Image: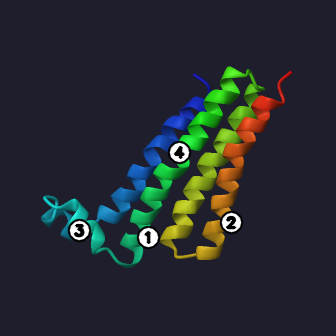
Amino acid sequence: MTTAYWCVLIAGLLPFLAIGIAKWDKTYLRNNAAPREWESKLQGRQARAHAAHLNSFEAFPLFAAGVLVAAACKAPQASVDALAIGFVIARLAYLGCYLADLATLRSLVWMAGTGFSVALFFAAASVR
């Protein structure tokens, strides 16, 4: 299995890291019967972790499709792997920025992550 495919697995699990951070609180354990109600009352770092959780799900499909399209088109594997690693690093940085409440930097890191996903399609398109 390629590094890029492993990155798809890691990226697919990142939303659960983010929500785990949001739930790292005793109040969640007492309110597990109504998780949506619990989510609606989050504030501060927990609310930001929850938002990062949702955004991780939103970012994942474009990235996963990019890796699959690049593989199907036989884009250079080293390039695909590097872009996939870049995406995972950007998404981890995104989560860190969200938790630290660094909104401007978070947006820049989000753009970088999206750029890596789009670059996977361009890598596929460049194959002749």
Residue at 30% x, 64% y is 24
Mark carried by residue 108: 2
Side of 64 where 46 appears, left or right = left
Q: Is residue 68 above or below residue 62?
A: above
Report which residue position mark 4 lands on. Answer: 60
The amino acid type found where label 1 is placed reads: Arg
Which type of secondary structure does the marked residue at label 3 adopt?
helix
User: Quarter-wise, where is residue 2 in the image?
Assistant: top right
- Snapshot colouring: rainbow
Instruction: Give coordinates of residue 49: x percent, y percent.
Output: 42, 65
Quick one: quadrant of the N terminus?
top right
Mark carried by residue 74: none
Precedes in sequence: disc 2 or disc 1: 1
The amino acid type found where label 4 is placed reads: Phe
Precedes in sequence: disc 4 or disc 2: 4
Classed neighbour count for the residue bearing mark 1: other residues with Cα under 10 Å, few (<14), some (14–19), many (≥20): many
Q: Is residue 11 above or below residue 38?
A: above
Report which residue position mark 3 lands on. Answer: 38
